[in-house]
Amino acid sequence: MPSLQKAKKIFREQGVRGVYNKLWYTMTYGKDTPRKLILKTLFPYLLHLPRLIEVETTTRCHLKCVMCEHTYWNEVGRDMSYDEFVYIIGQFPHLKWVGMTGIGTSFLNKDFLRMIEYVKSKKIDVEIYDAFHLLTKDRAKELVRLKVDKIIASIDAATSATYEKIRIGSNFEQVKQNLSDFFDIRREAGQIYPQVVFHYIISKYNLYETEKFIELLYEVTRGKERPSVFFTSILHQYKEIEGLPTVIPEEIVEATNRRALELNVLAAWNKNVPRRKADVCNCTYWSMPFIFVDGTVIPCCAGNEGNRREFQRKYAMGNIFQTPFKQIWKSEKYYKFRNRVHNNVVPVQCQFCPSFHVSTYHENTEELKLWESKA
C-alpha cells in the first residue's frame, strides 16, 4: 500500500488522537534519534508523568516455553482484576500508549478484552503480545472491532517439530491457522489495524530456521501485505536455560535479510543482538515503567525474563496499589535512579540489562541502603 494511501487509512481508522498518540510514541520511544533528543538532551526538564506504560494483566500461562522464566517459577499465577486495571490507568491522566502483556497468556484473564475496550474508549493506543495459540476467530474479530493498534505475534520457529519443542503445550498447525484466520478477518473488515509484528526469539533450537520463517510469513499473509519480523536473542541467561542462548552468526543475519528482501518482508534485529552495546547513559527506556500484576512498579521491561522476580521486587520503585504513582515517580528513589542513568552510572536495577553496556556496575553502599530503607 502506498505511504500516502496508508496514511489516509490510518487517519480514517484512528482519527486525530490516534495519529497524535503514534507520533508521540515514535518520538519518545520508537525511534532512537528523536527519543535521545527529546528525553536525553532535554533531561531533566521533561520529567512529567509517563505517557507510556506497560501493565501485566496476568501471570497465568498454559504453556511451558523452554526459554521463558514463567516455566521455572514457583509462585501461583494471578490475574489483575478489571477494577485494579482501571485504577492504574486513572493514575496516568495523559496516557498515550499502554502495553498490556506481561509474563503470562493475556487471554486467560477473562476481563482482558474488556480491559482493552476500556483503554480504547479513552483513545489510548494498545499493544499486546500473543502466541496466537488461543486467538480464536471470535477473539480476532473483537481485536479487529476494537482497532487494537499492534499485536506482537510471538512465534519462534518455521517447522512444527522445532516450534513444539520450544513452546511446549502449543500446536504449530493451530497457530498457523489462527494467523491465517486473523489476516482474513482483518482483510474482510478492510482495516490495517490491528497491525501485526512477528517476534522471533533465537535459541540453539531455531537458529537455522530464520530464513524459513521469512517464507512462513509470506505464506500466512498470502503475499498480500508486507509482514514485519523482529529477531532477538534470548534476553537473559540463567541456570535453568543454560546452553539455550546462542551467538547469532553474521552470515545468518545477512542470509535472512536477503531472503526478507526477496519476499518483501521487513526484518529487524533487537539491540541485544549486536555484541557491542551503547553505554547506559543512552538509555531512555526509564520513561516507560512496567507494572507487575500485583502493582509492583519497575523501571522498564528489560529486567523481565531473567528469572529474577524477587530481585525485581526488592529493588522496585514502589507499589501502585499502596502508593499513588505520582508520589512514586517523584520519590527520592526514582529521582536518583534517573540521574544515575543520565550520568552513566549503572543503577542496581540495571546491572543485568541486555540492551546496554552495564559491565561497569559496582555495588554502591549508599545506593543499596536507599533501597533497603522505607523511603
Image (cartoon, rainbow, N blue to C red):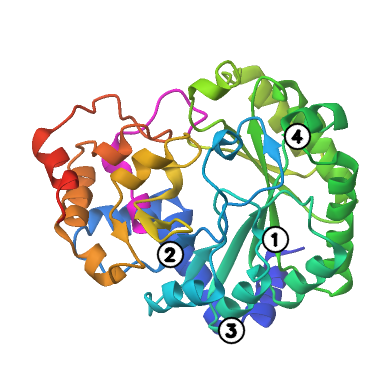
- Kind of residue at disc 3: Ser
Which is more foreground, mark 2 or mark 4? Answer: 4
Residue placed furthest toward the left: 366
Task: Give me the disc on residue 198.
Answer: none
Q: Position of residue 159 (x, y in %)?
A: 85, 31
> Of the residues under marks 2 and 4, which one precedes in the sequence?
2
Seen from the viewer's position, the closer of residues 31 and 363 is 363
At a point 18% along the width and 53% down the height, the residue shown is: 333
Q: CA distance from mark 1 to mark 2?
A: 22 Å
Q: Secondary structure at mark 3?
A: helix
At a point 77% along the width and 27% down the height, the residue shown is: 165
> Of the residues under marks 3 and 1, which one precedes in the sequence?
1
> Of the residues under marks 4 and 3, which one precedes in the sequence?
3
Q: Position of residue 95 (x, y in %)?
A: 43, 74
Q: CA distance from mark 2 to mark 4?
A: 32 Å
Residue receiving disc 2? 52
> Of the residues under marks 1 and 2, which one precedes in the sequence?
2
Q: Secondary structure at mark 4?
A: strand
Residue receiving disc 3? 121
User: Would residue 134 be found to the left or right of residue 340 on screen?
Assistant: right
At a point 66% along the width and 30% down the height, the residue shown is: 66
Q: Is residue 278 within the magenta segment? A: yes
Q: Secondary structure at mark 2?
A: strand
At a point 54% along the width and 70% down the height, the residue shown is: 81
Q: CA distance from mark 1 to mark 4?
A: 18 Å
Task: Give me the disc on residue 168.
Answer: 4
> Of the residues under marks 2 and 3, which one precedes in the sequence?
2
User: Magenta residues?
Assistant: 272-288
User: Vertically, is 290 above or below 8?
Assistant: above
- Kind of residue at disc 2: Leu
Q: CA distance from mark 4 to mark 3?
A: 36 Å
